[in-house]
Image (cartoon, coloured by chain):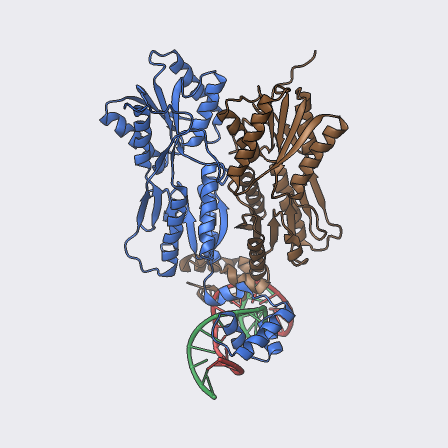
Chain colours: A blue, B brown, C green, D red
Amino acid sequence: MANMNDVAREANVSRGTVSNYLNKNKVRPEAARRIEAAISKLHYVRNATARELRTQRSNYVVFIVPTVWTPFFAELTYDIQAALQALEYKMILCISNSNYDEEKEYVDMANEQKVAGIISISYSQLNDYVDPHMPLVSIEKEPTGHFPLVSSDNYAGGRMAAEELDQRGCKRLIFIGSKHLASDAMKARQAGFTDYCQELHCNFSIYHFASGRHIQDFRNEARDLLQQLRNGADAKNIGIATSTDEYALEIFRIAEDMKMSVPEHFQLIGFDGGKISANDQPFLSSIRQPVKQIADAAVAEFNKLAENKTSVEVPRIMLPVSFYEGKTTKRIVSNQ
Amino acid sequence: MANMNDVAREANVSRGTVSNYLNKNKVRPEAARRIEAAISKLHYVRNATARELRTQRSNYVVFIVPTVWTPFFAELTYDIQAALQALEYKMILCISNSNYDEEKEYVDMANEQKVAGIISISYSQLNDYVDPHMPLVSIEKEPTGHFPLVSSDNYAGGRMAAEELDQRGCKRLIFIGSKHLASDAMKARQAGFTDYCQELHCNFSIYHFASGRHIQDFRNEARDLLQQLRNGADAKNIGIATSTDEYALEIFRIAEDMKMSVPEHFQLIGFDGGKISANDQPFLSSIRQPVKQIADAAVAEFNKLAENKTSVEVPRIMLPVSFYEGKTTKRIVSNQ
DNA sequence: CTGAAAGCGCTAACAA
DNA sequence: TTGTTAGCGCTTTCAG
């Protein structure tokens, strides 16, 4: 493996000149030509490790994410990668499975590797664990003080879900969330839903079902609830919102099994609006997160942080959600 | 930032001893204790960059993938990351958008970074571009000679799709593939389908529709075909297989719009069997790729390659696919 | 088992 | 502009 010395010797210049050439500093055209020739003759490729050691910085970014195997996270990962790449950063993909210990290991690794920084979407107290000097922007997480935050407006999304159901004639509104992972984002969604219902005096209830590995428990609980709804008096005017598309999908499938049809028997709105791919048109009505904006904002903030570490106030960026009308809600008929 | 010298001084030992301690070589217990104390007092963290420069190796693995924003690739990425992590490798996620130039840039980067190697899923002639000394295992790609290959048995999958439709009473079999990206994998799927039909004298046809960015063209072509099928004589016994779940999903939605129901009007089988998440039960019948096995096999091969570069024969691993019965095919009624 | 010393390949400061 | 030189922080001989 040829190194810079070999190139310098071959080109009859000094190592410094080769370095200058490589870093696009001014060199005599004559020298440039000889260096180019030497490089291609020797198949020289510059050693990034040495450069990073010397300059004390790299353009690796550690991206910590619970999973990529979900439409929302897949899309987010895709968008973040694209935004990072546009700024010449490289992504080290770290999947935490929502496990605090794994997250901490990734942070340790980030420290050892002297990476440019971290972008994380974590629902634990990870931020407390990382050195305040490490450039970090966190997504979807309630601020802990040190680090910039980018998230969508979960509270407004919760309200929106309730409102859309309300406007579609639902007389009984139901919110289904998770018993376990009660992250700030999830709480905000529920709070928005609740507030709307209380302010407008809707008839509503909140359920917390099992989640995570307890998917079978979730299904049982959901089945019981649907059973109960089917036999209820107001069976025809029910609207269900969930804290996540995944739950809504489960509910939908269970309803299918029970021969209850959506949106005839009840209307259903998920949360995230995750698309399976760029061209996907989901059938599930949902509160759609502005994934691309989140990604772009997170990376932009990150870059500011990594470039000049002097920003005094800590940004809190909150992006608006929107209602995506799929096929699990009724269409609103104009009154005109 | 404290470095190894500082630790050595603080612990009253030499730098070599600290290095030995860190690398789990034998050190006097007394020394070990003092070093530990020094490390935690100084908040010392080892600089991985320097170590990599000195040892001339790293445990980064470049993973090149067309996208992660598709159920199949999301799952594959998830599984590869997990397998890599288990072996203490770190993944640099490189999304190529199936663009050869981007792929080449990633390879260049891999060379500069002196990474441990590359795992790629590429449909272009990427393998020709990379130095044969670079550890590389490629997924889903027809062998070019130098590098190990891991793929699922696409040909058998194509046959299987035809057979399953045949066994479900379809009298007319249709295969829909892509006009553009005709990768080896896609060709094999189609070849399997074709061979089965010819061998068993089925009535079949092959269509190549637009793909990629031309999604609207695809939809138009698909709509025309369905229209035509609806009016045909044998309208009730049609089976459609596609080269990809994405196409099948598009077909399904178009059928829905046209009020044709699946599997009543026609039966439909996709390819990949991509799950949206670990708990997902897709409604689409499909030829399921053994994603986890692919990931594990690829990483295992990679690791062999990275450890001892002496393997003489180049492995070709082909994993069996299976039929996943969703709701877009009829159930087979036993003849008993 | 430990300490001293060489050097991985590069950049940046300085002098020419 | 260019050449010279001093490290970045670590691992790894080699002598002791």
User: Which of A51 and B27 lies nearest the eye of the viewer?
Assistant: A51
**With respect to residue A304, does A189 lie above or below?**
above
Locate residue A307, reporting x and y percent.
Answer: 38, 60
Q: Is residue B250 visible to the viewer in this orientation of the structure? A: yes
Residue at point 52%, 76% (across, down): A16
Q: A264 or A78, which is in the foreground?
A: A264
Quadrant of the frame with the N terminus of chain B: bottom left
Q: Tell me which corner region of the image, top left, top right, bottom left or bottom right, holds residue B154.
A: top right
Residue C12: percent from left, percent from top: 44, 73
Asked whether residue B28 is in view, the answer is no
In the image, A64 versus B94, the foreground residue is: B94
Residue sitting at x 35%, y 46%: A150
Asked if residue A65 lies left or right of residue A314, the reply is right
Q: Give coordinates of residue B36: x percent, y percent.
A: 47, 57
Q: How many marks?
A: 0
Q: Quadrant of residue A309?
A: bottom left
Q: Is residue A301 above or below residue A211?
A: below
Looking at the rendered image, the quarter that the C terminus of chain B falls into is: top right
**Position of D3 relative to A127 (above/below):** below
Measured from the top left, where is residue B257 in percent x and y? 48, 26
